[in-house]
Image (cartoon, grey):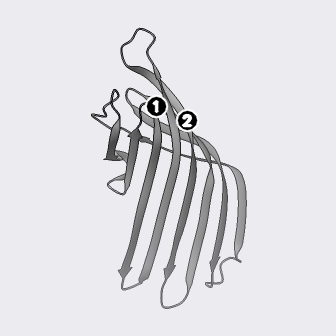
Amino acid sequence: MKGPVEYKYNRAHKDCTKDGCSFSEENRLATGTFMLYPDPEGWGFLSGEGTATWNQKTDGGFSNSKCSGEDHSTLSGTVKISAESGGMASAGVLEGDQRSSQNCGAMPPTHTHWNNGGGGTSCEIANLDLVHGGTGSASVPADEGYGTCKVEVVPQ
């Protein structure tokens, strides 16, 4: 068995008080493929593996009557997929970029780049037909309703 997997996360908010406003938006997308390996004893599938491309973008900031500031960051790279009976997990070392600026006089604009960022998620898809194939999707509990996973299982 093999198939594609997709993870999406989208969250945005804006909060305003009498002192000013803050806002943020975060988007994550991971797409990839995996293989499931059969149990040598004939009891279905034991485990599987694959790879996915991870892309994450975060934008945020604040504004008040005196000044404002913004922060923008990205995280991207290849993550490993581990398909297991308890769910699907992905993790990897990712490359990131962050830019910050504000006009409050406290600090100059900054730019940081790194290649040791971490990222990943865990998805559990119930009731997939591992004999005939099929598609399943589920929300990711750790993402508080903002993340979903979709998996398709295709017989070989």
The residue sitting at 33% across, 31% down in the picture is: 132
From the viewer's perspective, is residue 90 above or below residue 30?
above
> Is 116 in front, or is 16?
116
The residue sitting at 39% across, 71% down in the picture is: 13
Q: Which mark is residue 124?
A: none
From the viewer's perspective, is residue 128 above or below residue 46?
below
Q: Which residue is mark 2?
A: 50
**Real-space CA distance between mark 1 and mark 2, rounded to the nearest whole angstrom:** 8 Å
Tell me if 20 is positioned left or right of 144 in this view. Answer: right
Regarding mark 1 in the picture, which secondary structure is present there? strand
Q: What is the count of numbered marks?
A: 2
Regarding mark 2 in the picture, which secondary structure is present there? strand
Q: Which residue is mark 1?
A: 83
Tell me if 1 is positioned left or right of 59 in this view. Answer: left
> Is 99 in front, or is 130?
130
The residue sitting at 51% across, 51% down in the picture is: 30
Q: Residues within 10 Å of mark 1 (few under 14, many from 20)?
A: many
Tell me if 98 is positioned left or right of 120 in this view. Answer: right
From the viewer's perspective, is residue 72 above or below residue 116?
below
Amino acid type indicated by mark 1: Ala
Question: x, y (%) of residue 4?
Answer: 47, 43
Question: x, y (%) of residue 1?
Answer: 44, 29
The residue sitting at 35% across, 28% down in the picture is: 130
Amino acid type indicated by mark 2: Gly
Q: Tell me if label 1 and label 2 are in contact, CB under 8 Å.
A: yes
